[in-house]
């Protein structure tokens, strides 16, 4: 059954940050800002604000399953964005549904821990994410600590970036967007010596450097969530991957500048 709405529906699956800084609330706002209709399934109720993550109560896989099926029962979902998938059971469930329903335009934000250091998912969940969900994805969007943790490579130069992307590629990632926000200045400096903030897009192994402006005072939470959700929304609207990434980066820049 379809509700007949004209906007493409984008389903965000992830954790709820009640303070609205990251997670599902950031996802939903980015999806709506990109002109799509947001739908959401909550995997974990986290207790956090900008100061700290004080804890989390994860939902059961069954509770996540029932939310996702409620969405799929009403909407034709045009893209899926995953964030915090805290347990192996939830990661397995999401992979199973994406595969069984042939859901397109899956964007994985491989959320591991909060900036303050709180572990948002367990190791078994990451293993399932990599083995079962990654091969189904259009794009995975790690930041530097995430790709280092997943691949075991410490990123210090462009060769490290290529090697880490290669490992993810071999693990089944078709396309990878490495977010460069945490890169050392030695990588994030342009030909004129000016500090930049570059991201690295690998499409089927082909690297494109997406140079961006470095904004020193940026202290906005949820930018990773918003970027991945915005990409999913532009993919749902019919953009090719590189264009979806370009438009999503522009959106997140506007948010950071406004902050
Ligand atoms: N909490 C949830 C539910 C998230 O999904 C994320 C990141 O995706 C975070 C916290 C981490 O946010 P931050 O890096 O701003 O601490």
Image: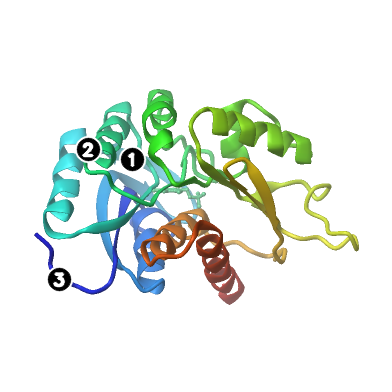
Q: Quadrant of the C terminus?
A: bottom right
Q: Nearer the viewer, residue 53 or 218?
A: 218
Residue at mark 2 to residue at mark 1: CA–CA distance: 29 Å
Residue 2 makes an appearance in the image: yes
Which residue is labeled 2 in the image? 100
Q: Vertical placement of 6 versus 52: above or below? A: below
Residue 20 in sight in this render:
no
Sequence-first disc among 2 and 3:
3
How far apart are labels 1 and 3 at the CA level?
36 Å
SS at mark 2 in the image: helix
Image location of residue 31, percent across then percent down: 37, 65
Disc 2 to disc 3, C-alpha distance: 23 Å
For the residues carrying marks 1 and 3, which lies nearer the camera in this image?
A: 3
Residues 150 and 58: in front is 150
Vertical relation: 76 (above or below) 155 = below
Nearer to us of marks 2 and 1 is: 2
Q: Label 1 CB, ligand 1: below 8 Å?
A: yes
- Picture disc at residue 42: none
Task: Tell me the quarter of the picture where residue 98 sits.
Answer: top left
What residue is pinned by disc 3? 4
Seen at 12% across and 59% down, the residue is: 74
Place residue 256 in its image quadrant.
bottom right
């Amino acid at each position: 059954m379809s509700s007949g709405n004209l906007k493409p529906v984008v389903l965000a699956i992830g954790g709820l940050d009640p303070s609205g800084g990251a997670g599902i609330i950031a996802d939903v706002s980015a999806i709506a800002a990109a002109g799509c209709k947001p739908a959401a399934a909550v995997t974990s109720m986290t207790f956090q604000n900008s100061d700290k993550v004080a804890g989390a109560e994860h939902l059961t896989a069954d509770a996540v399953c029932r939310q996702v099926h409620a969405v799929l029962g009403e909407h034709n979902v045009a893209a899926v964005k995953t964030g915090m998938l805290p347990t192996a059971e939830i990661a397995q469930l999401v992979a199973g549904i994406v595969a069984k329903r042939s859901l397109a335009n899956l964007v994985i934000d491989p959320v591991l821990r909060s900036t303050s250091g709180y572990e948002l998912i367990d190791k078994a969940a990451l293993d399932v994410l990599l083995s079962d969900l990654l091969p189904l994805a259009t794009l995975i969007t790690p930041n530097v600590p995430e790709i280092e943790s997943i691949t075991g490579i410490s990123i210090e130069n462009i060769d490290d970036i290529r090697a880490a992307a290669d490992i993810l590629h071999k693990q089944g990632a078709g396309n990878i967007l490495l977010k460069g926000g945490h890169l050392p200045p030695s990588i994030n400096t342009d030909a004129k010596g000016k500090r930049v903030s570059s991201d690295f897009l690998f499409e089927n192994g082909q690297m494109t450097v997406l140079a961006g402006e470095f904004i020193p005072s940026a202290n906005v939470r949820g930018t990773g969530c918003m970027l991945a959700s915005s990409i999913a929304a532009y993919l749902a609207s019919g953009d090719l991957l590189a264009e979806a990434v370009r438009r999503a980066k522009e959106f997140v820049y506007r948010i950071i500048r406004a902050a």
